[in-house]
Image: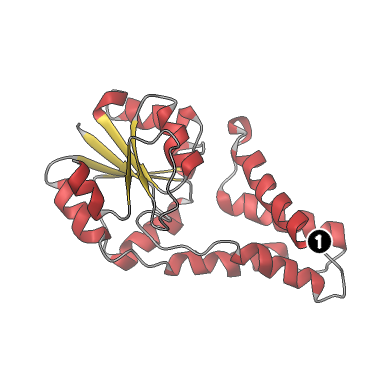
Amino acid sequence: MKAIIFDAFGTLFKVTSGGSARTIMQHITENGIVVDEKAFLDEWKFFYKKHTADSSAFKTEREIFIARIQMFYDRFGVSRNAENDADFLLSGAFQREAYHETKAVLERLMAEYQVFIGSNTDNDVLESVMKKNGIRVHKVYTSENLKCYKPSPLFFEKILAQNDLRPQEVLFVGDSITDDILGPKALNIKTVWVDRDNKGGDFGQDYRVKDLEGILEVL
């Protein structure tokens, strides 16, 4: 094992789920418009998946976010500035906190391995969160600088190629079954599922840990 690649949000840094979608839905319903919440949330997720899967027409997460909000505003005839609303909601991402064990575990691993971050996010968001929390690694890879998104094999192939690494020399650590387990496993990269909610299950991961400290035991 030569390198360990960590997902960022949900793995190294805390996140909240669904808050942005519900805020946009509230902007719509406060105009007296009735919205089916489940259908709205399902389409919100589908829009993101559809656009991140198209590597031929890459868009940053911010661009996708703005386009998604504008689509709903146009559909329901809501007169709001989608770009301003997107930037206001995205500003919360810059304030995300690291999990309590993140810094110590990364520093320990960096003494023995190449340690990278591989995240579906924009450069400025991740750079700001890392700086805020005093987190450092050897290299940082985002969907923005790789011009593709997990779980596309291309995301992982580019990291391997840029570091002259073979799949069997790498361990990928993350919290998302689709992005961080199924994605790298398609290239035969070993994986660690960080299951902080203790959901359990076998999704093809090589190891399951409850937090980052469990990785030290795995290694």
Rendered location of residue 158, percent (x, y): 40, 29
Question: Which one is in front, 141 or 203?
Answer: 203
Q: With 153 as the anchor, is 211 left or right in this view?
A: left
Q: Which residue lies furthest to the front in this view?
A: 201
Residue that label 1 marks: 36
Q: How crowded is mark 1: few (under 14 residues within 10 Å), some or many (20 or more)?
A: few
Rendered location of residue 102, percent (x, y): 27, 59
For the residue labelled by badge 1, is the local secondary structure a helix, a strand or a loop?
Answer: loop
Question: Which one is in front, 16 or 53?
Answer: 16
- Residue sitting at 48 percent across and 51 percent down? 122
Q: Which residue lies furthest to the left in this view?
A: 111
Query: Quick check: can you spot residue 41?
Result: yes
Q: In this view, does 208 lie above or below 187?
A: below
Question: Which one is in front, 8 or 209?
Answer: 209
Amino acid type shown at disc 1: Asp
Q: In this view, does 54 lie above or below 31?
A: above
Q: Is residue 97 above or below residue 187?
A: below
- Residue sitting at 24 percent across and 45 percent down? 138
Rendered location of residue 177, percent (x, y): 47, 42
